[in-house]
Image (tube, rainbow, N blue to C red):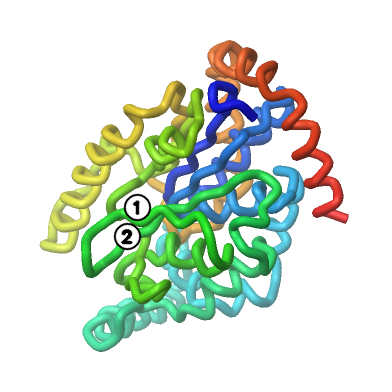
């Protein structure tokens, strides 16, 4: 496709809140809008990588629900953390268990590079992402990670798709960094929360960004040093995200409240929120996508054919 006709989709990080990506992308697919390039950070790289590999958004949604109902997820430490953050009423015995598990996690953080087992995240990613190279995706795909030694943002565009997404999703503190080509890589959201500028750098003329991070207005009561530290990180992340989004032509930002990044219990609600946010901006989406869509019609036909064979 000629450079002037590319539509880029930039998907931001946010853990479980990334379910909102699915809802927003469902609206794009209903409109017949398919990106020419997808760039993702953290959970955005998981959703984006699945789509780029040839799955439809409906297939991603079905697989997400299946994973959350699986024994694999039920026995994971990720679910245990999500349950602790869900805010739901629990029996006294459950609250006591949660208290001691939290203390154990804090102690383990002093001796290990991550409090979650890497195997949990690997199984999660493998459930959605095929064992292929980035260069083999049906839609051109990129993901971003942070080099912990140099402090640089790294754009991953070749190599193992699964491992690249694992690096982009390695939340600091929760998961250990991932080594790729001698670099110690961690979550892309440390530096780049929504990779709009990288979609632009990779040739997109029009960039649609979906941001699913926590709203800065949702400040919890600041009673402890940890509360203040977390709040400072939220403020820093908000302004970093604003910088990232300057490169986007349109931003879809669902109102997701204070749902924690490990809390997957609101999956259906999050998808609906993402869908509603995209529908609120549907007129602008159509206006932006129309000229780009016409410019690359034949390339999209070829790509749709590759996706068809990839899903068989």
**286 or 37, which is in the foreground?**
37
**194 or 163, which is in the foreground?**
163
The residue singled out by tag 1 in the image is 189
Alpha carbon separation for disc pair 1 and 2: 8 Å
Which residue is located at x 60 percent, y 26 percent? 2
State the quadrant of the C terminus: bottom right
The residue singled out by tag 2 in the image is 146
Which residue is located at x 49 percent, y 48 percent? 40
Residue 55 position in % (x across, y down): 74, 49
Q: Is residue 227 above or below residue 140?
A: below
Q: Is residue 98 left or right of residue 69?
A: left
Which residue is located at x 47 percent, y 33 percent? 209
Q: Single out the residue that lies furthest toward the right.
A: 312
Q: Is residue 186 left or right of residue 303?
A: left
Q: Is residue 25 visible?
A: yes
**Image quadrant where residue 69 sits:** bottom right
- Secondary structure under tag 1 reads helix
**How many residues crowd around disc 1 within 10 Å: few (fewer than 14), some, or many (20 or more)?**
many
Residue 42 position in % (x across, y down): 45, 55
**How many residues crowd around disc 2 within 10 Å: few (fewer than 14), some, or many (20 or more)?**
many
**275 or 42, which is in the foreground?**
42
């Amino acid at each position: 496709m000629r450079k002037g006709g590319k539509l880029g989709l930039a998907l931001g990080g946010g853990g479980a809140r990334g379910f909102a990506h699915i809802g927003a992308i469902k609206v794009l697919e209903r409109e017949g809008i398919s990106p020419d390039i997808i760039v993702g950070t953290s959970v955005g790289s998981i959703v984006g990588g699945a789509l780029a590999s040839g799955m439809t958004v409906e297939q991603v949604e079905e697989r997400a629900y299946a994973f959350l109902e699986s024994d694999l997820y039920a026995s994971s430490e990720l679910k245990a953390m999500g349950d602790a953050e869900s805010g739901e009423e629990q029996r006294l015995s459950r609250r006591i268990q949660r208290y001691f598990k939290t203390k154990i996690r804090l102690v383990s953080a002093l001796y290990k590079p991550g409090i979650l087992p890497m195997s949990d995240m690997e199984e999660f990613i493998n459930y959605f992402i095929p064992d292929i190279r980035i260069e083999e995706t049906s839609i051109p795909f990129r993901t971003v990670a942070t080099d912990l030694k140099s402090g640089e943002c790294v754009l991953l565009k070749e190599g193992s798709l699964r491992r690249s997404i694992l690096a982009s999703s390695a939340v600091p503190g929760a998961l250990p960094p991932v080594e790729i080509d001698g670099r110690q890589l961690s979550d892309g959201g440390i530096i780049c929360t929504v990779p709009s500028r990288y979609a632009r750098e990779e040739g997109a003329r029009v960039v649609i960004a979906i941001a699913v991070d926590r709203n800065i207005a949702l400040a919890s009561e600041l009673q402890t040093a940890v509360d203040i530290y977390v709040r400072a990180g939220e403020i820093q992340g908000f302004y970093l995200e604003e910088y990232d989004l300057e490169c986007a032509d349109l931003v879809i930002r669902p109102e997701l409240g204070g749902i924690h990044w490990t809390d997957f219990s609101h999956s259906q609600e999050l998808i609906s929120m993402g869908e509603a946010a995209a529908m609120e901006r549907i007129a602008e989406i159509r206006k932006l996508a129309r000229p780009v869509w016409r410019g690359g019609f034949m390339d999209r036909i070829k790509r749709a054919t590759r996706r068809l064979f990839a899903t068989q």
